[in-house]
Image (spheres, rainbow, N blue to C red):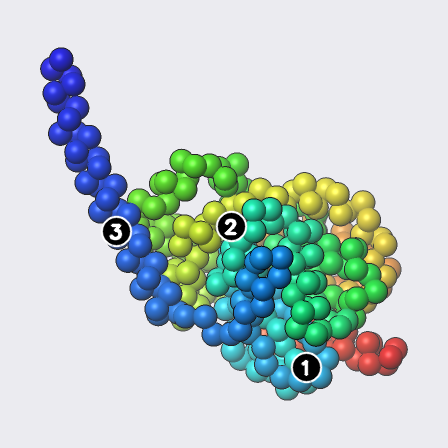
Amino acid sequence: MLWLILMIPLLGILMAVAIAGSFYTDRAIRQAEADFPPQGKYVKVAGVRLHYVCKGSEQAVVLLHGNPGSVQDYPPEIIDRIAQEYCVYAFDLPGHGYSDRPAIATPLVQAQLLRSALQKIGIEKPILVGYSWSSAIALAYALRYPEEVAGIVLLSAIAYKADHALLPLAKFAQSSLLEFLLKLIPPSLVGYFLFAHLNKGFLPQSPNVDYFKAAQALWTRPIQIQASLEDSKNLPSALEEMKKRYSEIDVPVVIVVGDSDSFVSAKENSYRLRDRLSHSQLIILPDTGHAIPQTQPQAVVNAINIIGKQFTKNN
């Protein structure tokens, strides 16, 4: 009986810690969303509300971010540059930023949601820009809807080998225990580990301070952590299926990679993909790591222009 008596105050302490942790996390989430509110519009498809930023006119260019990430993977500077010649649509992927998360969100399902969203908005034959993880969405889109894509730009592509930092934790993506723990763990603690993750992606450069602040605030929300883990879990099987069909992609593809990417193997992904695609071009950026949209914005614009000129010439 003594152990039972001793357990009562211990349980009380644990409950108090849980309540305090949950309160702190909820307050941190509200503060993060107040500091970095949604900047765009929403489109609802299949019961899922997707957040996107739109700017410019003419040919549509659809920007897809990495994992974890949001539309802020593409700084205002790069969106402004692209919008000088195109109509830019930068989407928060399902469960990231301010987009809802459906029950099933494989790369193919996300490609289907994206296509439905573009149709609802009234976009035909966009240029798709996939960055890191979202390269899988762009490739799935091109394989599923080959007549509905003007071309693809892939930045730091993951097309074969998902050597992702979140993979070891991905098996817990849909765990009830994880969902419970995320309500208790202070986002600031998660942000500490996030900084190391971001640093590796930016090497040999350093993360932009404003970008890091937004990432630390929004990426550490429980809903986005779970989305990131689930996306990491779903990626290897999706790539395994798609890689058998890459040679079927018949639209122009520009693959841009940094020569110092320590986050994703360029030889295992971008180089191999270039060799499988009949209408592809590989651009290697010197002294550049994984975070190309942040560190090499003009290179992104140049790659889009290559596709845009080809599409204009052929139409």
Q: Which residue is mark 2?
A: 227
What secondary structure is found at the residue carrying circle 2? helix
Q: Residue at x 17, y 33 (%)?
A: 12
What secondary structure is found at the residue carrying circle 1? loop
Residue type at the position of mark 2 = Ala
Residue 127 x %, y %: 72, 71
| Position of 284 relative to 248 (above/below) | below
| Position of 207 relative to 106 (above/below) | below
Q: Which residue is mark 1?
A: 86
Which quadrant is home to the C terminus? bottom right
Q: Residue at x 26, y 53 (%)?
A: 24
What secondary structure is found at the residue carrying circle 3? helix
Toward the top, the furthest residue is 1
Q: Residue at x 80, y 52 (%)?
A: 246
Q: Is residue 307 visible?
A: yes
Give the distance between the C-alpha atoms of the residues marked 2 and 1, in whole angstroms. Answer: 30 Å
First in sequence, mark 2 or 3: give its number. 3
First in sequence, mark 3 or 1: give its number. 3
Q: Residue at x 58, y 42 (%)?
A: 233
Give the distance between the C-alpha atoms of the residues marked 3 and 1, in whole angstroms. Answer: 44 Å
Crowd tier of the residue under label 2, counting other residues whose Cα lies within 10 Å: few below 14, some 14–19, many 20 or above: many
Q: Which residue is mark 3?
A: 23
Residue type at the position of mark 1 = Tyr
| Position of 149 relative to 7 (above/below) | below
State if disc 3 and disc 2 touch (CB < 8 Å): no
Which quadrant is home to the N terminus? top left
Residue type at the position of mark 3 = Phe
Q: Quadrant of residue 234?
A: top right
